[in-house]
Every structure is written in structure tokens, then in C-alpha cells.
């Protein structure tokens, strides 16, 4: 449990957000509601980079002596480590290192690390991969050693750190020797999602999107990149149906595709761990 002293601190969960889909902010609201229910902080607020309420506006309205910002992002990348903290006034050293504590006259702001780079994400990914096969075992549930696992990310050329969390998870899960193979694939970076069929040496594949929300990318873009016709994806989406049916056969492979990791019930505990780390920086 977090110390009672946090009853006089504010916690702000910062998401990317989107003006294109309402689903983008759902995980942030979900986890904020759970943390409010626990009653450990004086106030818990939701804020976003791309939608209302904006993170800078939220920060200016908080009067608690300590305010913790936790980025609900999958990686320590461009938005979570550069755009958002700079907008909040956090400075950097001459070497470029982010200074995560900002002292004001009557207030201390603490900017925590993204949840996606936390070590416990390994179990979250494994649980997602395990559960999707158990839920849809047709024609039978393949064993992990008969399956290639792909961890799917967005990728970007704006910040080389954006893929670090995914590459680390590939290394960690690969080291556990559970699956026949474990690989990273990306929407906008090499190796691309479309190469997964050539990479997999097994008939069975599980693709886990390492995204926070089930928004435009996970519901539309990635299924299309995996080979589902765009028309079919849009029809299913409009009908309120899953845009990928598990398993789907593509290029002689059976493919299971999971939901994003952002709604996992364990994440509020990860947020608390990030706050604990932030306390040590003060």
C-alpha cells in the first residue's frame, strides 16, 4: 500500500488521446477510476496530449503540494519523454537527461516513467497471448512450442527509444524459452507487420499489440496489415464486431490476434510502482 502521506498528493494519469476515436482514452479513465476507488491519493485526474482535458490545463489547476504525473504509454519514447514533460516545464541537463522533479514555490511536480517499460509488462504480454488461444482453441489449442509470438508496436523515426520497451520484452520472453520464436514487428518501422508470415517458422502465430488502447491502430490498421480486407474490417467495426476473428488463416498460417495490453487489471499496481520510484527522486 502507498503511504497515507499520499492523501495530500495529486496523481495525474497522462494518455496520448485521439480526436478520431473515443476508445483511445478508455484505459486512462478505467485506471483512474480504480485508483480513485482505492482512495490513496488526494485527487486522481485524467489528462491527454491529443484530446480534452489537456495535460497542461490540468496541471495548472492542481493546488496539492505534490503532483505525480504517470504517462500511460507503452514506451519511454517521443511523447512520454519529450513532448509532454517539456510542455509541463520539466527541464533537461546539458547532456539531455530529463530532470523529473520540478520545484515550484509551493509545489513539487514529479514526472514518472511510462508504465510500458515496467518489468511486470512481461507477464501482461504472456497472459494476453495465453488467454487468446484458450478462448478460441479451434481446431485445437496449439502448444506454445508450436507457436511464434509477435509483439506488435507502432514504431517511429522521431525517437529511437520508442521501440526499446518492445525489444526488451522480446528479449525477456525469448529468454524464457516458452514459444518457438518471439519477434518484434512494427507499423512504421522495420521489421514491418507484413513480414511476420515470412518470419514465423511455425503454422501457429499469436500477435499481441503492445498498445495502450484499442483504437484506430489496433482495431483497423493492424488487422489490415495482417491481411484482412479493409472493407471487411470496416464492416465489422460498424457492426460492433471484433475486426479479427480468432484464429484466421492467412498465408498457410493460423493467426490469433489479441486486444491491446492497456486495459489489463494489473496496471493500477504498475502506476503505484511508478509513483514509488518518483518519491525517491525528491
Image (tube, grey):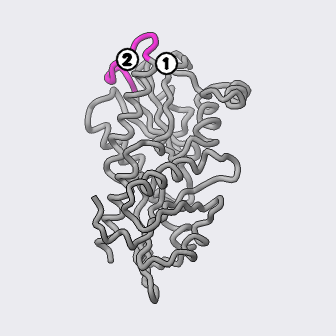
Label 1 belongs to which residue?
254
Label 2 belongs to which residue?
142
| Residue 142 painted magenta | yes
Q: Is residue 82 visible?
A: yes
Task: State the residue at coordinates (44%, 28%).
Answer: 206
Q: Quadrant of residue 216?
A: top right
Task: State the residue at coordinates (58%, 29%).
Answer: 226
| Mark 2 or mark 1: whose residue is earlier in sequence | 2
- Furthest toward the bottom, the residue is 105
Residue 15: x and y, percent?
Answer: 54, 57
* In-image side of 242 versus 160 (left or right): right
Which element carries disc 1, helix, strand or loop? strand
Q: Residues within 10 Å of mark 1 (few under 14, many from 20)?
A: some
Q: Nearer the viewer, residue 254 or 32?
A: 32
User: Disc count in the image?
Assistant: 2
Residue 29: x and y, percent?
Answer: 53, 52
| Labels 2 and 1 touching (C-beta < 8 A) | yes
Residue 141: x and y, percent?
Answer: 38, 16
The stretch of residues the image draws in magenta is 137-148
Q: Quadrant of residue 150?
A: top left
Q: Residues within 10 Å of mark 2 (few under 14, many from 20)?
A: some
Task: State the residue at coordinates (30%, 62%).
Answer: 2
Amino acid at each position: 500500500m502507498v503511504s497515507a502521506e499520499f492523501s495530500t498528493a495529486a496523481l495525474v494519469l497522462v494518455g496520448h488521446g485521439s480526436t478520431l476515436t473515443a476508445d483511445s482514452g478508455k484505459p486512462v479513465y478505467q485506471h483512474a477510476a480504480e485508483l480513485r476507488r482505492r482512495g490513496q491519493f488526494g485527487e486522481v485526474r485524467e489528462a491527454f496530449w491529443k484530446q480534452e482535458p489537456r495535460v497542461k490545463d490540468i496541471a495548472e489547476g492542481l493546488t496539492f503540494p505534490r503532483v505525480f504525473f504517470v504517462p500511460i504509454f507503452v514506451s519511454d519514447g517521443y511523447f512520454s519523454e519529450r513532448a509532454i514533460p517539456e510542455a509541463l516545464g520539466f527541464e533537461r541537463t546539458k547532456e539531455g537527461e530529463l530532470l523529473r522533479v520540478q520545484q515550484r514555490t509551493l509545489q513539487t511536480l514529479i514526472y514518472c516513467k511510462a508504465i510500458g517499460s515496467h518489468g511486470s509488462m512481461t507477464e501482461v504480454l504472456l497472459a494476453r497471448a495465453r488467454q487468446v488461444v484458450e478462448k478460441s482453441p479451434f481446431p485445437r489449442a496449439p502448444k506454445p512450442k508450436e507457436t511464434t509470438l509477435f509483439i506488435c508496436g507502432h514504431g517511429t523515426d522521431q525517437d529511437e527509444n520508442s521501440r526499446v520497451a518492445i525489444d526488451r520484452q522480446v528479449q525477456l520472453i525469448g529468454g524464457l524459452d516458452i514459444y518457438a520464436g518471439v519477434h518484434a514487428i512494427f507499423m512504421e518501422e522495420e521489421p514491418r507487420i507484413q513480414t511476420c508470415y515470412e518470419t514465423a517458422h511455425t503454422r501457429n502465430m499469436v500477435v499481441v499489440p503492445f498498445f495502450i488502447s484499442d483504437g484506430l491502430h489496433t482495431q483497423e490498421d493492424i488487422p489490415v496489415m495482417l491481411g484482412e480486407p479493409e472493407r471487411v474490417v470496416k464492416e465489422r467495426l460498424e457492426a460492433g464486431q471484433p475486426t479479427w476473428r480468432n484464429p484466421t488463416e492467412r498465408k498457410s498460417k493460423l493467426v490469433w490476434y489479441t486486444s491491446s495490453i492497456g486495459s489489463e487489471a494489473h496496471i493500477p499496481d504498475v502506476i503505484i510502482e511508478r509513483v514509488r520510484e518518483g518519491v525517491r527522486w525528491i
